[in-house]
Image (cartoon, rainbow, N blue to C red):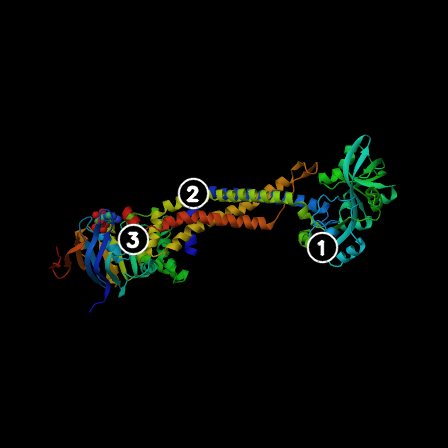
Amino acid sequence: MKLLFNIAWTHVSSRVRQTLVGMAGVAMGVGFTIMMAGLMQGSQLDFLRQLVDTMPHITIEDERRSVPTQPADQEYGAVQMSDIANVGKRPGIKYPESVMSSLRSWIPGDVAPSAKTTAIINHGGARIGITLSGIDTRREVQVSKLASQMREGKLDDLSRAPNGIIMGEALAEKLGVKTGNTVLLIGGQGIQLNSTVAGLFRSGLKRVDESQIYSLMGPAQVMMGQSGVVNQLRLRLNDPMLAQKVAAQVEAQTGYKSVSWQEANADLLSSFTVRDFIVLTVMGAMLLTSSFATYNIISTITHEKRQDIAIMKSLGMREYAVRRIFIIEAAIIGLVGILFGWILGYLLCYGWSKITIFNPLTGTTVPLQIYYSLMHYVVVGGISLVCCAGAAYFPARKATCVHPVDIIRGAS
Amino acid sequence: MTEVALQAVELVRRIEGAVSHTLVNGIDLAVNKGEFVAITGPSGSGKSSLLYLLGLLDAPSEGEVIICGQPTSKLSESDRADVRLTKCGFVFQFHFLLPEFTSLDNVLLPMRAAGRMAESEMRERGLALLGSLGLAEHANKRPNALSGGQRQRVAIARALANRPEIIVADEPTGALDTASTEQVFSILRDIADQGQTVVVVTHDPALAARADRRIHIVDGKIAEITERDAGKLVCAAEG
Ligand SMILES: Nc1ncnc2c1ncn2[C@@H]1O[C@H](COP(=O)(O)OP(=O)(O)O)[C@@H](O)[C@H]1O
Ligand SMILES: [Mg+2]
């Protein structure tokens, strides 16, 4: 092996320029791929983090996945009903306190109630449809980051102001209201409520910041026209990734529709899958292309070294041993290239992280989020090494399977 | 009774193709241990082809090559490589040294490939071999710093590296001047005198005359065998 390494080393070290080109090729491929991986995963994780921070991990609604059976169904075997009006009131979750305490006993996280309804906010001629969630401020802290997303005021201020509400900065800007101003909320059944803006928040998710409003349970229930009703339970888990599993269990236990954040954002997440697929393909292609220079070098060397190959075989060296020489050469080029690629990749990631861009999702200018992971370096390096070895294998096999006699005859 | 080191039985080498070509056409030959055999013949008569078969570089179409009592026709390619590595040393008209390696490293190559000795032992033997061929001060030079004769002597040292039973040389002096030719030939002669078996192809009748036996080949067949001491001996060359 030492002999093979020696020979390999003499080959690459006597071709400095070619070898450097090969190494540069590998380094570029590895560097840019690591950069892409860091950028892609960084932005994705950043987005998911915002999503997971802002949204409840699981939402339990006061509905069932299937249409509830009508009393007539239970009485008679064959009735058909159509056009049953969903009469007025939402049913609400029955005995929310006992459901919550039962959930708290086993879910790895916490749960808080809310009363959710839609309303129109009316201020100075502007009428904007919004979602109003009545919350329990003490419990809210356990299930959302709302408290930490407050830009003005505190959650507790909700109880100080008359019919206090908290709205997103974006919505406040749209309406032109400030903390302390009064706005008019108009509910579905024409119920009107004068509310005081007690605070402003920013979640970073535009659709939340522009259309979500929070109040205490009381005002929200008034707007719904159903006092005491809780129609939504929101769960926050210690590990958001468990949401799908836990949601299924919750639904099985309570019978209420339980939606994990993944389900709620299925469209977004599936667009990630497509994006991942595209980016992974491009990265693979980059690594493959970056090993072309290595292929080129090994082809050249095997061609130039036909005589040496023949004589080594004629002396009694096994074919696979001779072939290994060229694989080692590619590995030398690959390993050095990968090393520089790692450095390049890290520097590129670092450079990108210094650049700020406008994020249309949040409407803010933020630094690019880069995800640094040892895994990227290991996997990209590994794939690149395999590409290099593959790039060497084919020309090496071709060159070493020739019969030494053919070459020795030709040479003498 | 002298020991047979190398034996060819009914050896045939044919090239199949659009026009089939018989390079070696039924050669029977036994070379004793320590014997120095010269193969002569006109250009294209199949001398090299025979030598490749005897040195297991090429496989016969028919017949058998027996090296130190071991038949070789049924060996796998890698077993044949092992036999080449340890039992046959090759010298060609062209030296075929690895250009990036020093003389010593070139000589060490077969030993390292065989991997049977410690590195220090190998170096010792390599230097001794080079020294015995008058190359002591050239051990650390690369081939391109050596003369043709010196290169060919390095190639001989490489062929001797693993103490092979048999040395086969295909026109080893074909590209050398008279002085170097003389030197290389006396080295080969010495090798045989020390007990190794040498088969050498040469065009030079004067050199061939110094072999123990001269085998003249025409059209892939033995036409004439001349023993050095016992006058002329015409072989039953049929056709
Ligand atoms: N692969 C081959 N295909 C066809 N003819 C060949 C091949 N190899 C050698 N020959 C021919 O076979 C003959 C014998 O070649 P060779 O053994 O090299 O002769 P010598 O060494 O005596 O000059 C030559 O005429 C040569 O051209
Ligand atoms: Mg010849």
Describe the element under mark 3 as helix, strand or loop.
helix
Distance (Cα) linking label 3 and label 1: 87 Å
Disc 3 versus disc 1: nearer the observer = 1
Q: Quadrant of residue A321?
A: bottom left
The chain to which mark 3 is attached is B
Asked whether residue B64 is in view, the answer is: yes
Describe the element under mark 2 as helix, strand or loop.
helix
Name the residue carrying label 2: A296
Name the residue carrying label 3: B153
Asked whether residue B94 is in view, the answer is: no
The chain to which mark 2 is attached is A
Count numbered badges in the picture: 3
Do marks 2 and 3 share a chain?
no
| Residue type at numbered disc 2 | Asn
Determine whether the beta carbon of the residue marked 1 sits less than 8 angstroms from the nearest atom of ligand 1. no
- Tell me if mark 1 has few (under 14), some (14-19) or many (20+) residues whose alpha carbon lies within 10 angstroms of its own: some
Q: Position of residue B60 (x, y in %)?
A: 25, 56
Distance (Cα) linking label 2 and label 1: 60 Å
The residue sitting at 32% across, 53% down in the picture is B154
Classify residue A281 as left or right of residue A189: left
| Residue type at numbered disc 3 | Arg
Q: Is residue A131 above or below residue A73?
A: above
| Residue type at numbered disc 1 | Val
Residue closest to the eye, B135 or A319: A319
Q: Quadrant of residue A187?
A: top right
Classify residue A76 as left or right of residue B5: right
Do marks 3 and 1 share a chain?
no
Which label is found at residue A250? Answer: 1
Classify residue B99 as left or right of residue B183: right
Q: Position of residue A52 (x, y in %)?
A: 70, 47
Distance (Cα) linking label 2 and label 3: 36 Å
Residue closest to the eye, B216 or A123: A123
